[in-house]
Amino acid sequence: MFFKSSLEDRVEKAKTNSDEMNNLIEEYKPFIASTIQKRTGRFLKYGYDDELTIGMLAFKESIESFDKSKGKFLNFAKHVINLRMIDYYRKTKREGNVVSLEVINQQDDESTIDIGAAKAIEEYEKERENEARKLEIFQYKKELNDWQIEFSDLVKVSPKQEKLRNLYKDVAKLIIENRELLDILISRKRLPIKEIENHTGIHRKKLERGRIYIISLVIVMKGDYNYLKEYVNWR
């Protein structure tokens, strides 16, 4: 059985294979043109408009800079192309007229390219991180619903006093670290108040008031919620 290589795999190959590099640039000329035309708002033609040549250079730069562990290549390439176009139009505005590609190439050096790639990577990382946060919150809301807890409830039940918040965090940690308490919580879908009271001496009424907050903390701690864990600040 033959498996078709993903675009990201081809990009990795193109870094050390000039034929694959040229093939990718040729195949994705329509993508390059579309990305630039959306920014310029006008039709562009290869061989006539410097913007498209800059776009191809930016696409090549994207291939050379891309890290496939960070996501989809085309999203990254779009950032680099847009950044290059911004640089181009800034130079054009500074000169007061349309400057030639040759002049632009003379003005650019490796440090400029590195800075441009770094900016594009930073923007791409921010976008990817925001998407990951959204997905994480969506999954968290879904898991809370399984416990009959609404996400909006957390704002209402969150203790205003830092001392009480820290107390509930300690209770959540105790549950995570104590297999018996965790099993009761998971299997019965209820906070094991009596058992926690026996372990900690905390009055059951105080535990009952913090039930939703404590359960929501346990869900974060035992789940794959890296961003939410940072937000909680476990001390």
Image (tube, rainbow, N blue to C red):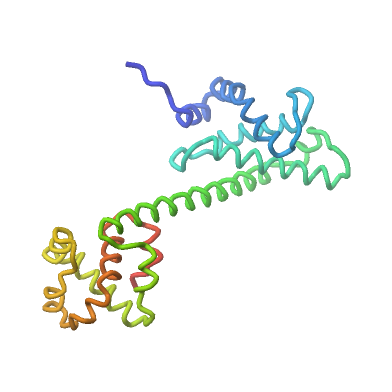
**22 above or below 203?**
above
**What residue appears at the point 47 percent right and 49 percent down from the top-left corner?**
131
Seen as rendered, the residue at the extreme right is 96
Q: Is residue 231 shown left or right of residue 73?
A: left
Where residue 27 sits: x, y (%)? 58, 22
**What residue appears at the point 88 percent right and 40 percent down from the top-left corner?**
97
Q: Is residue 97 shown left or right of residue 116?
A: right
**What residue appears at the point 25 percent right and 60 percent down from the top-left corner?**
147
Where residue 104 sits: x, y (%)? 78, 38
Q: Observer-nearest residue: 132 or 47?
A: 132
Where residue 144 sits: x, y (%)? 30, 59
**What residue appears at the point 88 percent right and 44 percent down from the top-left corner?**
96
The quarter of the image holding the N terminus is: top left
Q: Observer-nearest residue: 111 or 35?
A: 35
Q: Observer-nearest residue: 157 or 113?
A: 157
Seen as rendered, the residue at the extreme top is 1
Where residue 174 sits: x, y (%)? 20, 70
Quadrant assignment, res 141? bottom left
Number of on-image labels? 0
Quadrant assignment, res 113? top right
The quarter of the image holding the C terminus is: bottom left
Q: Is residue 182 shown left or right of residue 215?
A: left
